[in-house]
Image (cartoon, coloured by chain):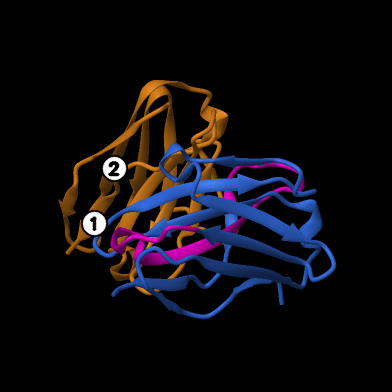
Chain colours: A orange, B blue
Amino acid sequence: EIVLTQSPGTLSLSPGERATLSCRASQTINSNYLAWYQHKPGQAPRLLIYGASTRATGIPDRFSGSGSGTDFTLTISRLEPEDFALYYCQHFDSSPYNFGQGTKLEI
Amino acid sequence: QVQLVQSGAEVKKPGASVKISCRASGFTLSTYYIHWVRQAPGQGLEWMGIISPSGSSTTYAQNFQGRVAMTRDTSTSAVYLELNILRSDDTAVYYCARPLIEYSGSFPDLWGQGTLVTVSS
């Protein structure tokens, strides 16, 4: 099974700064099958990026995804107060469709 | 309004079973795969499995093999998650989720509101 490892575990930044979140896979993933989610307490997860780099409907363009093979990145160009949350990557290359353990983005 | 609506919170004793429903509103559930995902307190998201549009095919995560069943009822446009032999570490919020595209298992973008299951003696 493919294991996803996210880093850092916690990222402490300020509004206006740039955030770079990493997701590393234990084996090569077809980049068409990598997604990023934002998750806030008491809410359902929100799909941000799919296919490694395509923004989901309604997602601001300050969110971008990149990467291929085993290394993927979510970048938030200029942090807004509402961006402070948990972020997860997930693959759909082959079952089980594991999530990474998450990165907490905090002020 | 397009949404997934899940059944309400449950409190169960260890060893019992729970069955959670997930109903579609504003779209046809029968053309979509449905994922189930859970989040235990203080933990990350955990993928549990997926059921095909017809309900004839299911794939479960190894952690739940033998204890979980995902089913569909086309007459009620609902999908169900049943988890048996509950343990205290099954206490979690359980989500159903629908992928972006019909007949594709990838990229859930529509999620239910979550169902809290508490397992306690």
Horizontal arrangement in the rendering, residue A35 relative to residue B86 (left or right): right
| Quadrant in which the C terminus of chain A appears | bottom left
Asked if marks 1 and 2 touch (Cβ < 8 Å), the reply is yes
Residue B23 seen by the camera: yes
Quick one: label 1, few (<14), some, or many (20+) residues within 10 Å?
Answer: many
Is residue B99 magenta-colored? yes
Q: Residue at x 43, y 33 (%)?
A: A66
Is residue A93 a member of the stretch shown in magenta?
no
Q: Residue tagged by mark 1?
A: A105
Q: Which residues are magenta?
A: B84-108
Q: Looking at the image, which residue is at 54% across and 55% down?
A: B36
Which is more toward the observer, B73 or A84?
Answer: B73
Quadrant into which the N terminus of chain A falls: top left
- Viewer-closest of B105 and B85: B85
Residue flagged by tag 1: what amino acid is it? Leu
The alpha-carbon separation of the residues under discs 1 and 2 comes to 9 Å
